[in-house]
Amino acid sequence: MKILLVDDSKTMRNIQKSVLSQLGYTELEEACDGQDALSKVKAFGPDLLLVDWNMPNMDGLSFVKAYRQDDKTTPIIMVTTEAEKSRVIEAIKAGVNNYVVKPFTPDLLSQRIQETLEKCAAA
Amino acid sequence: MDPALITPFIKSVQNVFATMLQMPVEVKDPQIKQATSTTYDVSAIIGMSGDCVGSVVLSFEEESALRIVALFTGIEVTVDSPDFADAVGELVNMISGGAKAMFEGRKASISTPSVVLGSSHVVSSQKDVPTIVLPCVSDCGRFAIEIAIQDQVESSGSGNQSAAASA
């Protein structure tokens, strides 16, 4: 399973990588903002994306909207400090499948990843 | 400054440290920042806009910052490493994001953080915006959160606030 991590914080990407490798996912690619992610998705072909919201150049919401124009099905989990209900709704309307609010425990992130993949497999 | 804007930062810093570092933080009584204020070696600054306008600064002495970053990232980094600044920036990002989600009846946005590194610096806020300092104590050392926010919902409106670092 190929997973794309989109976050301007290397610290956060490293934390996510650590959780993912503990779950056995090692085919990972990183992007530092939405534009970087858009430039990588075609060549990498992710099966799952973890996307931050607040990033320079292109924020996560804009990236999701752009990505969903060509790919309606690959699951996306937003991993962000934006915790307000209105933001969650906005993200879901844009095409996000699940949502993790920072700060998060490794257990919570891994639970959300598992449930997202199970839901998408069942759909 | 409305206590309703301060309490969320107390809860948020405790939540961030408990969740990401598995470490409790004791937040001491809020203080109004004085002209002759404590100096710091590491500061992460984040801007806030929307219904609450201003800045939030997370500041440390170098030793505390190094210990906290090592715990947060799981690796020892030096102050001049880009990973160090990145980690400190992410801490202020999470603290501010968590706090603003607790602002009742107010919608605010946060900027991407900036990090200032320099021995014994002071971060100044706009002079007509009172700054509240939250002194924090943890097993990794002391640090502080400085909050300089104007409530646009209740005020008659004011110009942008900015934080300037002076060494």
Image (cartoon, coloured by chain):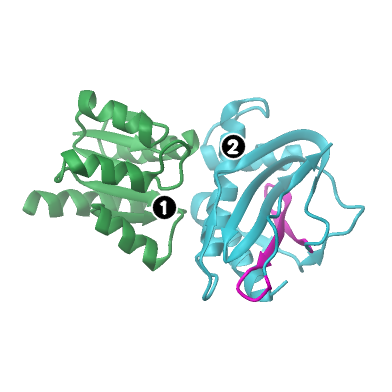
Pointer 1 chain: A
Question: What residue do we see at 63% from left, 65% from top?
Answer: B10
Question: What residue do we see at 68% from left, 75% from top?
Answer: B3
Instruction: Describe residue B113's horizontal placement relative to residue B142 as left or right.
Output: left
- The residue segment tinted magenta is B130-156
Quick one: B132 or A72, which is closer to the camera? A72
Instruction: Describe residue A36's horizontal placement relative to residue B146 as left or right.
Output: left
Q: Main secondary structure of the magenta part?
A: strand
The residue that mark 2 highlights is: B70
Instruction: Check residue A105 in the rendering and tell me which mark sits there, or answer none.
Output: 1
Element marked by disc 2: helix
Q: Amino acid at mark 2?
A: Ala
Residue A36 visible in the current orientation: yes
Q: Quadrant of residue A14?
A: top left
Against A40, residue A97 (above or below) is below
Quick one: A26 or A74, which is closer to the camera? A74
Instruction: Describe residue A33's horizontal placement relative to residue A99 as left or right.
Output: right
Local packing at callout 2 (Cα closer than 10 Å; few below 14, some 14-19, many 20+) is some
- Which quadrant would the N terminus of chain A be assigned to in this image? top left
**Judging from the image, what is the letter of the chain drawn in cyan?**
B
Pointer 2 chain: B
Indicate yes or no whether the magenta region holds residue A112.
no
Q: Amino acid at mark 1?
A: Thr
Image spot of residue A8 (x, y percent): 46, 36
Against A31, residue A62 (above or below) is below
Question: What residue do we see at 67% from left, 25% from top?
Answer: B80
Instruction: Check residue A113 in the rendering and tell me which mark sits there, or answer none.
Output: none
Element marked by disc 1: loop
Image spot of residue A53 (x, y percent): 41, 48
**Judging from the image, what is the letter of the chain drawn in green?**
A
